[in-house]
Image (cartoon, rainbow, N blue to C red):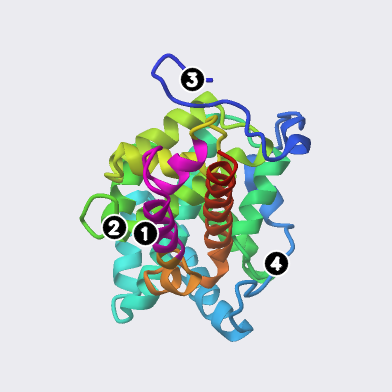
Amino acid sequence: MKDEKGLWYRPFSFNPTAAATSRAKVGPIVVRSLRHCPGLIARGGGTKKQAMSIWDRLGEFITRVSSSTSSGVADVVEAVRTVFSGDADLRRRVAFSVAMIALSAKMAKADGIVTQDEVRAFQQIFDVPPKETRNVARLFDLAQRDVAGFEIYAERMAQMCGSGHSNCAMLEDILEGLFYIAKADGLVHEREGLFLHRIAEIFRIDEAHYESIMARHVNLGAGDPYVVLGIERGKPFEEVRKRYRKLVSDNHPDRLIARGLPQEFIKIATTRVAAINAAYEMIERGLRHA
């Protein structure tokens, strides 16, 4: 269904078990659960050394930010720039990680309620080594407590992670991760929908791209597979296939890692490609039986 602004927030039909989960409050939000979550290392195929190198440095960074006088969004952004000034690749990966953690915290604050399903989704995206879970929880808590609104965070994160152009792929990756967490309990609730749509506006992600991302997580009805692929219904099948192949190529895990997506977040890539494959197969079956 849509709210009064035309934004989708209907139940997500992919996981009926999760959809039935009660939205009971979970203590002091995600922080407590994160401190006890199991850590999985380099699920995306990287070595333990590769995974730990990012999380060790992220831990050092969070310790530095947590000890600052104000620890607001400005401190966070400036710390990323200065601490990792000598390593552009590591800076890009840490910036992505920080943006995901901080905006997840802001989304939880905007929604007001966090379910165990959302905690688990957070943990699935963040393959955090056990010894680093406390540091991630500290940054999450810091972002939640910061009086700065989520829009300021989104603007600063866009400046830190983005290319400066509209429809920046890395910012789309962040939005995808936020959708993955939001829909984990079976629903993208109204406040979450408003939050995500506003994030997309700040990230300069146009409506067509936003709808494609949303369609990978929310069932929009009969037109859904075409929206997922970002192509108009009625196009020749060859154009559909061409579009599908380009999306699969653009979203290959190696390409996502090359543009700054850490290996620990490869769950975003695999979920996206699965949705693209499913949409293409649905269109193919429909055309074959037409």
Q: Around disc 1, counting alpha carbons within 10 Å, would you say few (fewer than 14), some (14 to 19), or many (20 or more)?
A: many
Q: Position of residue 36 (x, y in %)?
A: 74, 57
The earlier-in-sequence mark between 2 and 3 is 3
Above-or-below relation of 131 to 208 = below
What crowding class fits label 3: few (fewer than 14 Cα within 10 Å), some (14-19), or many (20 or more)? few
> In whole angstroms, how far apart are the C-alphas of marks 1 and 3?
28 Å
Determine whether 11 is above or below 141 in the image.
above
First reached walking from the N terminus: tag 4 or tag 3: 3
Q: Are marks 1 and 2 in contact (CB under 8 Å)?
A: yes
In the image, which is nearer the foreground, mark 4 or mark 1?
A: 1
At 50% from the left and 75% from the top, the residue drawn is 54
Amino acid type of the residue that numbered disc 3 sits on in the rendered structure: Lys
Q: Is residue 206 magenta?
A: no
The residue nearer to you, when weighing 250 against 205, is 250
Q: Name the residue under label 1.
A: 170
Alpha carbon separation for disc pair 2 and 4: 28 Å
Amino acid identity at mark 1: Met
Left/right placement of residue 80 relative to residue 124 reads: left
Q: Which amino acid is tagged 4?
A: Gly
Q: Which of marks 4 and 1 is nearer the N terminus?
A: 4
Numbered disc in front, either 2 or 3: 3
Relative vertical location of residue 57 with respect to residue 194 in this rendering, above or below: below
The tag earlier along the polypeptide, 2 or 4, is 4
Which residue occupies 52% across, 35% down? Answer: 109
Horizontal and vertical percent position of residue 246: 39, 62
Identify the residue under disc 2.
162
Q: Quadrant of residue 197?
A: top left
Give how far apart the Cα atoms at labels 1 and 2 are: 6 Å
The circle on residue 84 is: none
* Residue position for label 3: 2
Q: What stretch is highlighted in magenta?
A: 224-248
Real-space Cα separation, disc 2 to disc 3, in angstroms = 30 Å
